[in-house]
Image (spheres, rainbow, N blue to C red):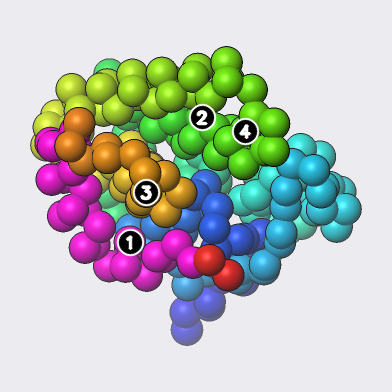
């Protein structure tokens, strides 16, 4: 008789790109049915006091395991989920391929960090022009780097970098509709148009709620 593993609790928000990265990864790894999502609102100026005892940084995603231990940071959670299935690993375990994958993931997830900080700054009543210019410059360089590598990224087996870049494109559409990133990055745009059709992306479309 097969025993169903106990569920894990993922502290979740429908608008967090980092939560979406974990959810897309979980779908692709075939372990999404093991996640129980709990709506956990967080904001820079409004720490969630219920979350802080679990994650002292107060960020989501935060994953509670059945044994009571806790994992946080979307990359760490994805690494853990990658150990729970019998299929091909989405994160290479060793060798040069691992470091290429992790570097590209760092580029993509760092870009998401930049976009979130940029959005927070430009929504302020008195945004600092120097910061806005810096975020815009970093965005230009990040998009240029993605455009330069996307064909090689696409040629590799599905992995964490592709998942994160799929979320990056969707987040640009969701929060930065005024940026015509597709015109500047036609190869990235073409890849993203196809990646967005994957069931994992369709099942995790960003919501306003």
Where residue 26 appears, x then y in whole percent? 43, 58
Q: Magenta span covers which residues?
A: 185-207
Q: Which residue is mark 2?
A: 114
- Mark 2–mark 1 distance (CA, rounded to whole Å): 22 Å
Quadrant (top left, top right, bottom left, bottom right) of the C terminus: bottom right
In-front residue for pair 22/186: 186
Q: Which residue is mark 4?
A: 121
Ranked by sequence position, the earlier of labels 2 and 1 is 2
What secondary structure is the stretch in magenta mostly built from?
Answer: helix
148 horizontally vs 78: left or right: left
- Whether label 4 touches label 2, CB < 8 Å: no
Residue at point 66%, 59% (across, down): 11
Nearest to the eye among marks 1 and 4: give it. Answer: 4
Ranked by sequence position, the earlier of labels 3 and 4 is 4
Residue at point 71%, 61% (across, down): 40
Nearest to the eye among marks 2 and 1: give it. Answer: 2
SS under mark 2: helix
In-front residue for pair 93/179: 179
Where residue 63 appears, x then y in whole percent? 65, 54
- Whether label 3 touches label 2, CB < 8 Å: no
Q: Which residue is mark 3?
A: 177
- Mark 3–mark 4 distance (CA, rounded to whole Å): 16 Å
178 horizontally vs 23: left or right: left
- Whether label 3 touches label 1, CB < 8 Å: no
């Amino acid at each position: 008789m097969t025993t169903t593993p106990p569920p894990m609790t993922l502290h979740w928000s429908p608008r967090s790109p980092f939560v979406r990265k974990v959810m897309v990864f979980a779908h692709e790894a075939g372990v999404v049915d093991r996640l129980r999502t709990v709506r956990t609102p967080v904001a820079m100026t409004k720490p969630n006091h219920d979350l802080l005892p679990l994650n002292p940084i107060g960020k989501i995603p935060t994953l509670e395991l059945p044994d009571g231990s806790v994992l946080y940071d979307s990359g760490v959670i994805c690494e853990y989920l990658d150990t729970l299935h019998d299929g091909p690993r989405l994160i290479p375990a060793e060798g040069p391929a691992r470091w290429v994958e992790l570097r590209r993931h760092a580029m993509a997830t760092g870009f998401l960090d930049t976009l979130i900080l940029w959005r927070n700054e430009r929504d302020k009543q008195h945004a600092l022009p120097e910061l806005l210019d810096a975020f815009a410059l970093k965005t230009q360089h990040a998009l240029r780097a993605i455009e330069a590598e996307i064909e090689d990224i696409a040629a590799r087996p599905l992995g964490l970098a592709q998942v994160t870049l799929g979320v990056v494109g969707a987040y640009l559409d969701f929060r930065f509709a005024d940026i015509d990133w597709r015109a500047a990055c036609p190869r990235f745009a073409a890849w993203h148009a196809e990646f967005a059709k994957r069931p994992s992306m369709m099942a995790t479309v960003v919501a306003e709620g």
